[in-house]
Structures are given as C-alpha cells and as structure tokens.
Image (cartoon, rainbow, N blue to C red):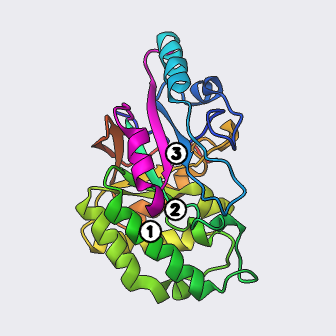
C-alpha cells in the first residue's frame, strides 16, 4: 500500500472550492481521502455552525468511485469543543467515516487563527490552547489523528524554548493520545507555510518518548496545488528522528506502511 495525504478539503468545506476530480488527477492512482470540516460555534461568535453535507458527500464519492476504481475514502475534521461534545457524537453516530481528525480551532469566543501577542500574550495562549487540547484527547475518543498540534500558535512567532513552557502539558496530551491509539499529524502547511517545522521536530521526539508510534503526514490542502505539500521534507525529518513507518486509516483502523523513499519535492 502506498502512503497518501490524509488531511485535505474540497467544496464540501466552507473554506475550499476544490473538486475531488482535481485531487484524483494529481494523486497518480493512490487512495484519496478528504477531511471536511465539522465545527460548532457558540452564540458569542459571529460564525454559523459548519456541518458537513454527509449525504451529498457520500453520493459524490459513490459516483466518482465508479469512475475511478474505488479510490476515495471518507474523512472528517472535527473541531472539538467540550460544550458541543454531545452534538458532535450525535452527528457522527452511524456515519461510516474511514478517518476522523481532531482539531482545536476555537475557545467558544474567538478562533485561534485570529490571535497574536497583540491580542493574547503568548504564555496565556499556550496555557489555554493546550488545556483545551488535553480536554479534547481525554473526551473525544473517536479521533484517529491529532491534527496540527500547533494550530493555536500559528499567528505567533514561537521558539522551541518558549513551547517548553508547557512541556508537562504536552506530555500529558501525548500520553493520552498514545493510550487512545491516536496518531500525531505532521501538518506540512503548518510546518512550511507558517514556519513551524522546528516545533514539529520537537514534538516528534516528545510523542515518541511516551511510546507514540503512529504518525501521519498531511498537507491540509484546500487547493489541489497544495496536495502532498513538501512531503519529501517531512519524510526526511521523520527519518532523521528514527521513524520509518506511517499510519493510514481505513474504517478508522490503522495500517502501517513504510516511510516513502522516493518522493518528488513540492
């Protein structure tokens, strides 16, 4: 089995207009999975809930699978929040997703991508964001992958030394993730578009130190041009840290595949 990108979005997410067909053309015969957004927002936020059209999504996948040799799998990116955990479970019930990502996108008042030191001091943001993430890995046991662990810090210029302020909390998060068989995602958009590759180098060793063996590499693509964004660089990083296999998920069960050797740079 070939490794394939496991975090992508199409027009079934509100922040993308991309098509399955474009990804299928780019993916060179490999499996394809998209992870469309599910996010509930509080009344304090000027955002409508983002609830995937599962029936429409499934119908389009079924139609395209007849044309493209059953290559498309079903995925979802769940923006977890404690107040909405029951609504999340109600939505997921009886749906046949192959992969569930867990993300922490907001705190019920504002989205984390909107923040910087001018809004919330870094130390305060570190504490709140990772407290919410720990709550998520403890309560959302459906998740197969912990996505972009740095999402709430993308708007900050953050060093590893500064991230170490919350190392005990990160250790708790990764220990819980390992107990739940939750993979750690290397999100290449975070790594190379937001300049956080150094944080992922640190996280790889931390996750492994508590017994973590499940890793995914994903582009978080919202346009086809970002499909497998700089995968070669992420694979090299993993190899340098002693990782020689990745996990792929089907029917929410992981299968190990060898870390790809020959990948074209992007």
Q: Is residue 2 visible?
A: yes
Residue 87 falls inside the magenta stretch: yes
Whichever of labels 3 and 2 marks the residue nearer the N terminus, that label is 3
* Cβ–Cβ under 8 Å for marks 2 and 1: yes
**Which residue is nearer to you in this view: 48 or 239?**
48
**Which residue is nearer to you in this view: 38 or 16?**
38
Whichever of labels 1 and 3 marks the residue nearer the N terminus, that label is 3
Q: Secondary structure at mark 1?
A: helix
Say if 98 sits above or below 38 in the image: above
x, y percentage for residue 2?
39, 35
Q: Residue at x 50, y 82 (%)?
A: 127
Say if 147 sits above or below 29 in the image: below
Residue 94 tag number:
none
Residue 7 tag number:
3
Total residue callouts: 3
x, y percentage for residue 259?
38, 49
Q: CA distance from mark 1 to mark 3?
A: 19 Å
Say whether residue 27 is left or right of residue 18. Answer: left
Residue under numbered circle 1: 133
Residue under numbered circle 2: 104
Which part of the image, by quadrant, shows the N terminus?
Answer: top left
Q: Residue at x 45, y 23 (%)?
A: 71
Magenta range is: 68-97
């Amino acid at each position: 089995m070939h490794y394939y990108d496991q975090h992508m979005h199409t027009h079934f997410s509100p922040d993308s207009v991309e098509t399955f067909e474009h990804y299928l053309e780019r993916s060179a015969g490999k499996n394809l999975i998209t992870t469309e957004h599910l996010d509930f927002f509080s009344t304090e936020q000027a955002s409508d809930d983002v609830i995937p059209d599962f029936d429409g999504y499934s119908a389009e996948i079924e139609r395209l699978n007849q044309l493209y040799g059953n290559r498309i799998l079903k995925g979802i990116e769940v923006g977890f929040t404690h107040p909405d955990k029951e609504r999340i479970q109600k939505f997921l019930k009886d749906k046949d997703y192959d992969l569930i990502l867990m993300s922490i996108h907001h705190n019920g008042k504002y989205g984390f991508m909107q923040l910087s030191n001018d809004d919330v001091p870094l130390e305060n943001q570190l504490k709140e964001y990772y407290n919410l993430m720990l709550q998520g890995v403890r309560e959302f046991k459906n998740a197969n992958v912990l996505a972009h662990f740095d999402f709430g810090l993308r708007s900050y210029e953050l060093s590893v030394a500064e991230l170490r302020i919350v190392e005990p909390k990160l250790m708790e998060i990764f220990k819980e993730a390992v107990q739940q068989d939750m993979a750690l995602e290397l999100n290449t958009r975070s790594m190379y578009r937001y300049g956080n590759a150094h944080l992922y180098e640190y996280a790889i060793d931390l996750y492994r130190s508590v017994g973590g063996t499940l890793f995914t590499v994903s582009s978080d693509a919202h346009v086809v041009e970002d499909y497998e964004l700089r995968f070669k660089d992420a694979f090299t990083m993993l190899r340098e840290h002693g990782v020689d296999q990745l996990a792929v998920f089907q029917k929410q069960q992981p299968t190990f595949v060898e870390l790809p050797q020959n990948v074209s740079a992007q």
